[in-house]
Amino acid sequence: MAMHAARGAALASNKLLTWETIALGLALGGMMFAGAWLGRRLLDRMSDRIFLGIIEVLVAAMGLQFLLFPR
């Protein structure tokens, strides 16, 4: 906790921590919480076979993306 307070004080003293950034952080944190909650509910209702199928499709799509659009 002390480390977070020190970091917040350092950011505030350099004008990097504003009410806008605090509001944005709270909004993003809320969306992350909601997404994790929704994902967990979906995962609990999904069978192992469907889950593995989705993962395989996503891995194949990412592999194709790396092959077709190299950086």
Image (spheres, rainbow, N blue to C red):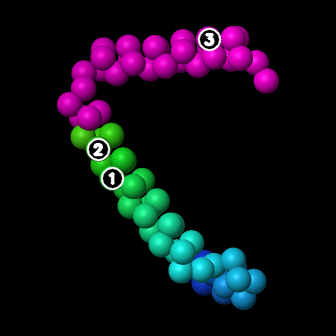
* Above or below for 65 versus 32: above
Q: Secondary structure at mark 3?
A: helix
Of residues 32 and 18, which is closer to you in this image?
18
Say which residue label 2 marks: 38
* Above or below for 55 versus 10: above
Residue flagged by tag 1: what amino acid is it? Ala
Q: Secondary structure at mark 1?
A: helix
Identify which residue is drawn at 71% across, 17% down.
Answer: 69
Say which residue label 1 marks: 34
Viewer-nearest of discs 2 and 3: 3
What percent of the width, then of the height, locates residue 48? Answer: 30, 20
Identify which residue is drawn at 57% across, 72% down.
Answer: 21
Identify which residue is drawn at 45% across, 68% down.
Answer: 26
* Above or below for 15 versus 46: below
Which image quadrant is residue 1 in? Answer: bottom right
Specify whether residue 61 is painted magenta.
Answer: yes
Q: Mark 2 or mark 3: which comes first in sequence?
A: 2
Q: Is residue 2 visible?
A: no
Marks 1 and 3, how far apart at CA: 30 Å
Identify which residue is drawn at 53% across, 80% down.
Answer: 19
Q: Is residue 16 left or right of residue 41?
A: right
Please tell me how crowded label 3 is: few (under 14), some (14-19), or many (20+) other residues with Cα within 10 Å: few
Marks 2 and 3, how far apart at CA: 28 Å
Tell me whether circle 2 and circle 1 mark residues in contact (CB < 8 Å). yes
Marks 2 and 1, how far apart at CA: 6 Å
Q: Secondary structure at mark 2?
A: helix
Q: Which mark is residue 64?
A: 3
Which image quadrant is residue 71 in? Answer: top right
* Above or below for 50 versus 7: above
